[in-house]
Image: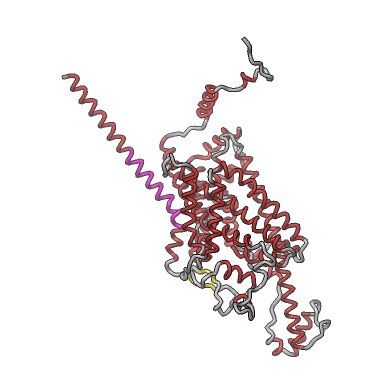
Amino acid sequence: MPRLVLPNPGLEDRIPSYEELERREVEEADDRPKWDNKAQFRLFTLIVIPLGIASMLVSFLVGLYYNSIIALVMWYFFNSFQEPLPWHSCPMTENNTGIVDECARSSPVDYYWYRETLNISTTIDDSGVIQWWLLLCLISAWAVLYVCIIRGIETTGKAVYVTSTLPYLVLTIFLIRGLTLKGSVDGIKFLFTPKVEELANPTTWLDAGAQVFYSFSLAFGGLISFSSYNSVHNNCERDAVIISVINGFTSVYAATVIYSIIGFRATERYDACFDNNILSLTNAFDLSETNLTRDNYDSVLQYLNSTHPAKVSELDLKTCDLQSLLSQGVEGTGLAFIVFTEAITKMPVSPLWSILFFVMLFCLGLSSMFGNIEGVLGPIEDMKILPKKWPKELITGLICLVCFFIAFIFIINSGNYWLALFDAYAGSIPLLIIAFCEMVSVVYIYGIDRFNNDIKWMIGHKPNIFWQATWRFISPLIMLVIFLFYFVIKVREELTYIVWNPEYEDFPNLDKKFYPPWITVVIVILAGVPSLAIPCTALYIFIRNQCRRKEDRQGLVHSTSVASVNEKQNNV
């Protein structure tokens, strides 16, 4: 009888059969560390499940406004395909007799952001209407996101190759270009020069802690959802070190690129400030161009102040300070849509740099949204809220559709104020509380020794002393201190927000206003609901388990009574 001879002798013996694989799986399950008792298991699940729901709520709230920012990025990207850029200069009035007054009193980039893009109102109470151009961008943003995550990790894993690698390429291009610009080195020096007064400020460390949470997606749930797709024996210790190193390097690398551009922008403003002052003095005192230069400006100004103080005071000369210009406008959405766009307009071939910049922001935002949506989609599937027969494409589509309709609040006239509100409260205190509870529940309820045994079973050895000290003491203490300081500062802080108001006396400076009283309810919902979800869900699970126990006991009594009746019938 003919027999097939394999080119690799003994291969059929080395390939495990189905029965062998099942036997190994049972042995591996038996090797896993066990619970000491059932009460400990119930206590741990009583905390872990509520933490998962709280993380899901935070991911949902953050995803709402995060994808709205992506919609704004798409609006700027679509408008970058023109020369000159639309925010390069102020627009003309309707009758073409001059430039628009609001733009003339501020700047082209400010006007394009606040008026042309946001069409912003002067208070959060003045909601206004939906801006149709932002609605189209919002539809595009959620449609692109849905296509990328339509099948969950199957499609997200392919898209992340582009969204994660392309920003590094664009950052490198911007760094090379930035280093050739005047003043870029001053910006980089400003970045790496420590300020003692800032380091002594608790708010600085609170902002740094919040940034780390966002950067590593800690307490969001998306990271845990993605890690659940790994092999059970995946080297998680190695992955943690690699992620930390790459993340830290990326943060410093991106900051270097950003501050090289900020240095260029500040130097341009610094030169313009000096040129305007020199021009004002030259015209007022009829000086020749050679008599007043940058080198002798201070001495000439001092002389004119001593001889003609009244005339000098009428000129309204500006104070030109490079350090103050470097520290202006480098946070929030203003960094991307005001500071960077202004710097781009001063570069040659500015549309090309604008396209590259907003493509990078789009990729960064999209990759972050993958984790946010996975942090919502995973728990919903695990809790089996929706029917099991519903396909994943439908569930993902429903989540995106609900988020899309709620996000309408960000594309009305007061939408930017709502976006700032979500950014300040949706992902701050809840993340700190969730992360602290996760650490305490694993270390002190689940047990650090059992956790070490789990890690040993996964990677073959126990974590070293660094991990032990971090998990037991350092991390919980740091998070507790950050939370307490954050809570104290926020409680003492006045509820104010900044508005773009052309009627403000110090315009184009932003006007500071107090939030209306009803905004407190919104803040409680944003910061309180995810936090309160932990004790409320734990209480619900506890009551449900107690009710189930009573039902089980009643079922046992009922079964016994039926058996006794049958016995009597048989005896008769």
Q: Is residue 556 above or below residue 63?
A: above
* Residue 270 relative to residue 231: left or right: right
The single residue placed furthest to the right in the displayed view is 290
Q: Main secondary structure of the magenta part?
A: helix
The single residue placed furthest to the left in the displayed view is 572
Quarter placement of the C terminus: top left
Residue 415 screen position, x and y as percent: 51, 65
Task: Please tell me which residue lies in front, 468 or 92.
Answer: 92
Quarter placement of the N terminus: top right
Task: Please tell me which residue lies in front, 521 or 492.
Answer: 521
Q: Is residue 170 above or below residue 124?
A: above
* Residue 197 relative to residue 218: left or right: right
Residue 553 screen position, x and y as percent: 29, 34
Residue 500 screen position, x and y as percent: 55, 72
> Is residue 63 visible from the viewing direction of this image?
yes
Tell me how the rendering is colored.
secondary structure
Q: Is residue 18 above or below residue 298?
A: above
> Is residue 489 visible from the viewing direction of this image?
no
Q: Residue at x 66, y 51 (%)?
A: 248
Residue 535 falls within the magenta-colored stretch: yes
* Residue 83 relative to residue 568: left or right: right
Residue 233 screen position, x and y as percent: 58, 34
Residue 83 falls within the magenta-colored stretch: no
Q: Residue at x 73, y 69 (%)?
A: 267
Which region of the structure is painted magenta?
527-548
- Quarter holding residue 190: bottom right
